[in-house]
């Protein structure tokens, strides 16, 4: 997991005929200097189907983690 890593995925949700397409990229990594906590990735996502763009924080850079934060509206911005 590093700054610049990107994902593009389709959730399969029926917002458009093509589903729901999301693009995401890591813009920042926060690391606990004492090593007690896992690194946190700041991920900017762009929901191309619904024209929604936000930034979320995840400890695992994958579709499930990004969508969990998106669905819960836990945005950093």
Image (cartoon, rainbow, N blue to C red):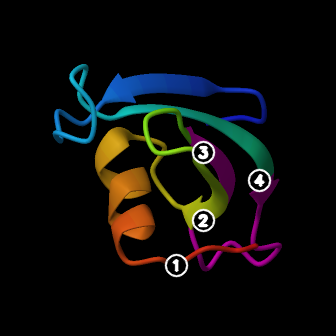
Q: Which mark is residue 57?
A: 2
Q: Nearer the viewer, mark 3 or mark 4?
A: 3
**From mark 3 to mark 4, how far is it between C-alphas?**
15 Å
Percent across and percent down for residue 5 are: 66, 26
Tags 1 and 4 in contact by the CB under 8 Å rule? no
Instruction: Check residue 45 for magenta coloring.
Output: yes
Q: Earlier in the sequence, mark 4 or mark 2?
A: 4
Tags 2 and 1 in contact by the CB under 8 Å rule? yes
Residue 30 vs residue 11, the one in the foreground: 11
Tags 2 and 3 in contact by the CB under 8 Å rule? no
Query: Can residue 39 be seen from the camera position used here?
Result: no
Q: Which residue is mark 4?
A: 29
**From mark 1 to mark 3, how far is it between C-alphas?**
12 Å
**From mark 2 to mark 3, how far is it between C-alphas?**
11 Å
Q: Which residue is mark 3?
A: 45
Magenta span of residues? 29-46
Element class at badge 1: loop
Element class at badge 3: strand
Q: Earlier in the sequence, mark 1 or mark 4?
A: 4
Residue pictured at 24% horizontal, 36% vertical:
11
In this rendering, the answer to whether 68 lies above or below 63 is: below
Element class at badge 4: strand
């Amino acid at each position: 997991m590093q700054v610049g890593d990107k994902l593009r995925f389709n959730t399969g949700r029926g917002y458009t005929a093509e589903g729901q397409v999301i693009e995401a990229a890591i813009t920042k990594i926060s690391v606990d200097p004492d090593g007690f906590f896992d690194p946190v990735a700041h991920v900017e996502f762009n929901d191309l189907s619904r024209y929604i763009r936000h930034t979320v924080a995840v400890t695992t850079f994958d579709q499930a983690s990004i969508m969990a934060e998106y669905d819960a509206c836990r945005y950093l911005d």
